[in-house]
Image: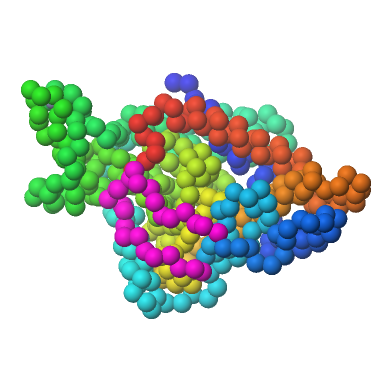
């Protein structure tokens, strides 16, 4: 069987420059860069009489899109919409100058000192997160993982992984500079699992599932009460469909099971069921895996790459690997919270998926300090039975991930600042020659040429994903 080339999304991280760009810049660097930009922008501004004050002083309050995604109403859908608080307002303006570096804290949503929930809304948010955090703990059951391994065609998975990792190893060696292969064997195992799961194992339940008697399309009849057996398997709701053929008229039930054991038997569902089972399979094959909950009614998986020493985004329904910008830049969705849960704790990974302020939805479920407090609580709880050494290792990893996530935002701020500078260059009087010298103040890594080429690389990636990742799965976009 021919090995599938790594998807174009891997370009994302395969370029050494890109990875180091995200890893090495810290707060000090950002502060320094910001002050240089601000100084430079002010200088330019003085050359332009009559331009409005958009650089100094507070940004005017902007309209924020409400939490809405009317197409979806999944069982994962946690709680009713809550009133918006004024403390976090990402910019969503269409103004051409809205790319001015956004306020650093607004993008980072810097939480400050953790504080326990006191008001009822924060309490509700805490309860929701605690109950969500239980989902991946259900995977930590040797009997379940054994049963999963009975289902997975291990020979096929390991065979494909052997082949692909061999190819990657050979590619790396052929470069002759001692570089490591892009993905390790463990990554290739999960990639093979992803392909098999998506193409051969799990079945998608469409919005008009075919009648099981005559295969005619059905018509949704809303929800119905779970039967005792369905309830026993953890289905809290059941979607009901009726066959559209007048001579048939049979009813079709779609119980939304949360129980992974049961889903191993039914092997069907929508995004919630797919991600639940796939994440458990990743655990069964020995990888560290996270179940990622998104407040805009989506879920996906993250697996820790031992080779790349970071968490990799996986969308099993789209067969997407390491493509964290899929939702915002490809689907044009706006996201508020993305929280990753595992048997090792919880992490706010929103910044991995929301790289720009324009893709951020208002975070209004609780104050950021409360969110941090709850996440710390969940970590403490999950790690309470671990050894000191293990806990210490995870804490170090937490800091490394925090640095990675901060890097995404810093890179985004720098990129929008440079874009803005170029915009201004076009409008500034051409008799002003100072900008040539100013340009040299930019770090080499961020020269506009470099950024332009990175941007077009991203566009290619998105275009390729459209062909390889989405079009062959038309019924699965967007997920529920
Ligand atoms: Zn029928």
Locate ligand 1 by image quadrant: top left
Judge whether residue 74 is colored magenta: yes
Quadrant containing the N terminus in the rendered view: top left
Judge whether residue 231 is colored magenta: no
Residue 33: image x %, image y %?
Answer: 75, 59
Residue nearer the viewer, 216 or 188: 216
Left or right for 459, reference 81: right
Left or right for 377, reference 443: left
Is residue 289 depicted above or below 107 in this figure?
above
Residue 139: image x %, image y %?
Answer: 31, 52
Q: Which quadrant holds residue 461? A: top right
Q: Which quadrant holds residue 195? A: top left
Taking the view exactly as shown, the residue that stands out farthest to the top is 1
Residue 145: image x %, image y %?
Answer: 30, 47
Q: Residue drawn 86% across and 55% down?
A: 47
Left or right for 60, reference 249: right
Q: Which quadrant holds residue 351? A: bottom right
Magenta stretch, overall SS: loop
Q: Residue drawn 43% across and 61% down?
A: 346
Which residue range is magenta in the image? 62-87
Q: Residue drawn 37% across and 50% down?
A: 297
Quadrant containing the C terminus in the rendered view: top left
Residue nearer the viewer, 62 or 454: 62
Residue 96: image x %, image y %?
Answer: 66, 48
Q: Is residue 315 visible?
A: yes
Q: Residue drawn 53% across and 76% down?
A: 113
């Amino acid at each position: 069987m021919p090995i599938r080339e790594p998807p174009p999304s891997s370009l994302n991280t395969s370029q050494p420059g890109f990875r180091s760009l995200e890893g090495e810049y810290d707060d000090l660097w950002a502060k320094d860069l910001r002050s240089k930009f601000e100084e430079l922008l002010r200088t330019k501004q003085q050359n332009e009489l009559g331009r409005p004050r958009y650089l100094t002083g507070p940004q005017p309050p902007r309209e924020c899109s409400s939490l809405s995604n009317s197409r979806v109403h999944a069982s994962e859908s946690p709680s009713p919409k809550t009133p918006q608080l004024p403390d976090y307002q990402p910019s969503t303006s269409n103004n051409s100058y809205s790319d001015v570096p956004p306020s650093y804290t607004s993008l980072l949503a810097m939480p400050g000192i953790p504080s326990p929930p006191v008001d009822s809304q924060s309490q509700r948010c805490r309860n929701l997160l605690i109950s969500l955090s239980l989902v991946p703990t259900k995977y930590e059951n040797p009997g379940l993982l054994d049963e999963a391994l009975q289902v997975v065609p291990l020979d096929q998975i390991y065979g494909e992984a052997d082949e692909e990792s061999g190819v990657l190893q050979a590619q790396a060696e052929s470069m002759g500079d001692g570089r490591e292969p892009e993905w390790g064997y463990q990554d290739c195992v999960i990639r093979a699992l992803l392909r098999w799961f998506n193409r051969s194992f799990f079945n998608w339940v469409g919005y008009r599932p075919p009648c099981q008697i005559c295969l005619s399309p059905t018509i949704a009849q809303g929800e119905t009460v779970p039967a005792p057996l369905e309830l026993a398997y953890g289905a809290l709701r059941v979607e009901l469909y009726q066959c559209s053929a007048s001579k048939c008229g049979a009813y079709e039930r779609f119980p939304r099971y949360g129980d992974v054991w049961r889903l191993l038997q039914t092997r069907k569902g929508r995004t919630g069921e797919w991600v639940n089972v796939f994440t458990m399979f990743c655990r069964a094959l020995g990888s560290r895996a996270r179940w990622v909950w998104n407040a805009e009614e989506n879920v996906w998986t993250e697996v820790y790459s031992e080779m790349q020493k970071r968490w990799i985004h996986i969308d099993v329904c789209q067969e997407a690997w390491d493509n964290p910008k899929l939702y915002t830049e490809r689907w044009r969705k706006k996201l508020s919270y993305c929280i990753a849960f595992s048997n090792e704790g919880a992490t706010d990974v929103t910044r991995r998926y929301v790289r720009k302020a324009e893709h951020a939805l208002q975070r209004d479920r609780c104050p950021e300090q409360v969110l941090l407090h709850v996440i710390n609580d969940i970590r403490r709880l999950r790690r309470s039975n671990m050894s000191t050494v293990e806990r210490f290792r995870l804490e170090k990893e937490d800091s490394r991930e925090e640095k990675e996530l901060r890097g995404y935002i810093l890179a985004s701020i720098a990129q929008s600042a440079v874009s803005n500078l170029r915009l201004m260059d076009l409008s500034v009087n051409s008799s002003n020659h100072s900008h040539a010298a100013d340009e040299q103040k930019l770090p080499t890594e961020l020269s506009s040429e470099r950024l332009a080429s990175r941007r077009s690389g991203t566009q290619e990636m998105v275009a390729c994903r459209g062909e390889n990742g989405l079009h062959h799965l038309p019924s699965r976009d967007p997920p529920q």
